[in-house]
Image (cartoon, grey):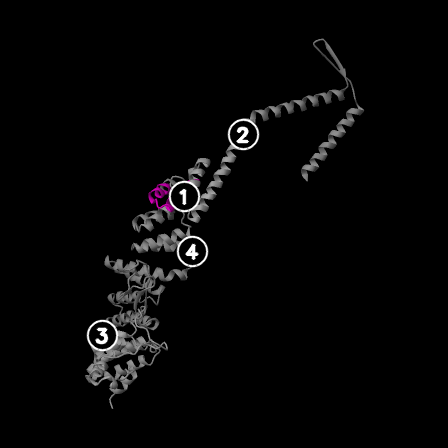
Amino acid sequence: MLRALWFMVLLGALALAAMWLADNPGRVNLEWQGYVVETSAAVLVVGIASVGFLSALLYRFWVFIRGVPAGIARFRREGRRRRGYLALSRGMVAVAAGDPGEAQRQARRADDLLEQPSLTMLLSAQSAQLTGDEKAAQKFFTEMLNSPDTEFLGLRGLLTQATKREDSYEALKWARRAYRLKPESEWVARTLFDLASRAGLWAEADEALAGAIRRKHLTVAEARRPRAVLSHQMSIDAEAAGDNTKALKLSKKASQDAPGFVPAQIKYAGLLKASGKNRKAANVLEAAWGAEPQPELAKAYWRVVGAEDVMAVTKAAQKLAAYNPGNPATSMMLARAALDAGLWGDARSNLKTVGASDEPFSGGYCQLMAALEEAEHQDMAASREWLVRAANAEPDPTWVCDDCGNAADSWTALCGGCGGFDKFHWRRPFRVPGLAAPESGGAEPHLLTAVEATHNEQAGPASATPARSPQDVDAESAPQ
């Protein structure tokens, strides 16, 4: 709009100038080299304007002729770039489609046309990987480190290769460099945390986790459990180094971040006891029992309260049970303590409470029942029957890796099977089903105990009796 207005103003000014010259033609006399030219001022102005216009045309024509070679070269360069980017795009499509031959052809074509290795090295590396030539791919990734534009892509490629080779040292080296280059990358932060934690570098893993929290890659709530595990491991290292003050501080942090993390609660209670704070240590274990009861908590509680004989353990067990009275694990703890103390009635009462719950009979429950039958009534037949049931019962809860299913008696930060960090959780391991399936109705196979099998062999098929239920055994064993 402004340009059109400016053109109209200029055109009007020229028209006014032309009208003024027409009204005031005047006369001009020019003498030069014996020649005399007489004309009007308007004609002189028109002549000068014509000469200027022709001069401008000649100049533009000369510039055009002079720029023709450069224009032709530029046109050819643009054509090469278009064809090069087209080859680059086709190469990426070939990589995505898993066509190594086409990817390599397009990579070579793009490299020849573009003459920019920083753009084509990634395609060359990926096509080399498709053909299984990891050495060539590593060469391309390494060359990419020399350009700021492709350095991060080269680091990612080298990191991926090291991870595939399970070379944790090399992978950690590239992850650290990538983190320094792009600390805001969520992928880099998570990779560095994973590699550092798997290598047992707890402090470095904690620093990577803190950086991820600052950059909003994960929330504070999501980071509490892994931070608690890292603090717990650093506490163990600090105690081993003789720095009990630092160990206690880190263990307290782990205990507060994850109240349901039993190993941290046990560690914290042990450090409190070592510093003379027995009552506080007991409070920690009592709160942990209320959150998630586990046998190791009970054992730690006996140590903290100084329960050195069976009666002291029974008394301590009754006190600890008050913090989670309705849990089957509490009844199992009380039954074990009563059985060790020879309190058969208390042991049987607590085992009946476990049997009446919705929990399936576990191997530990059956073994306690076997021990009780043998100790209280010297009923070896009933005891053997319970031991047979124990072999077919559900497994007791233990530490199980969520990734590979590896079961362990004690918690560790790293799984010995898959190397995963903080993958062990307290639960029942998966039970491998037997090879024999029930013939009909979907019912469980008939359980024939060792005692009944011996009796059947002696009496013949007609005298075979069905297996007794746990409630039947309890009723028969109860005092009349």
The residue depicted at 33 percent of the width and 81 percent of the height is 356
In the picture, measured across the screen, residue 48 lies left or right of residue 154, that is right
- Taking the magenta stretch, the answer to whether it contains residue 134 is yes
Which image quarter: residue 126? top left
**Label 1 or label 4, whichever comes before in sequence order:** 1
Percent position of residue 322, x then y: 32, 78
Q: Are marks 4 and 3 in contact (CB under 8 Å)?
A: no
Residue assigned mark 2:
72
Q: Nearer the viewer, residue 407 or 38?
A: 407
Q: Amino acid at mark 3?
A: Ala
Circle 1 — which element?
helix
Mainly helix, strand or loop, the magenta region? helix
- Taking the magenta stretch, the answer to whether it contains residue 95 is no
Q: Amino acid at mark 2?
A: Ile
Q: Are marks 1 and 3 in contact (CB under 8 Å)?
A: no
Residue 183 visible in rendering: yes
Which image quarter: residue 229? bottom left
Circle 4 — which element?
loop
Residue assigned mark 4:
217
Q: CA distance from mark 1 to mark 4?
A: 39 Å
Q: Nearer the viewer, residue 456 or 351?
A: 456
> In which quadrant will I find the C terminus?
bottom left
Q: CA distance from mark 1 to mark 3?
A: 74 Å
Q: Are marks 4 and 2 in contact (CB under 8 Å)?
A: no
The disc label shown at residue 101, or none: 1
**Label 4 or label 3, whichever comes before in sequence order:** 4
Residue assigned mark 3:
307
**Label 1 or label 3, whichever comes before in sequence order:** 1
Residue 176 visible in rendering: no
Residue segment shown in magenta? 119-141
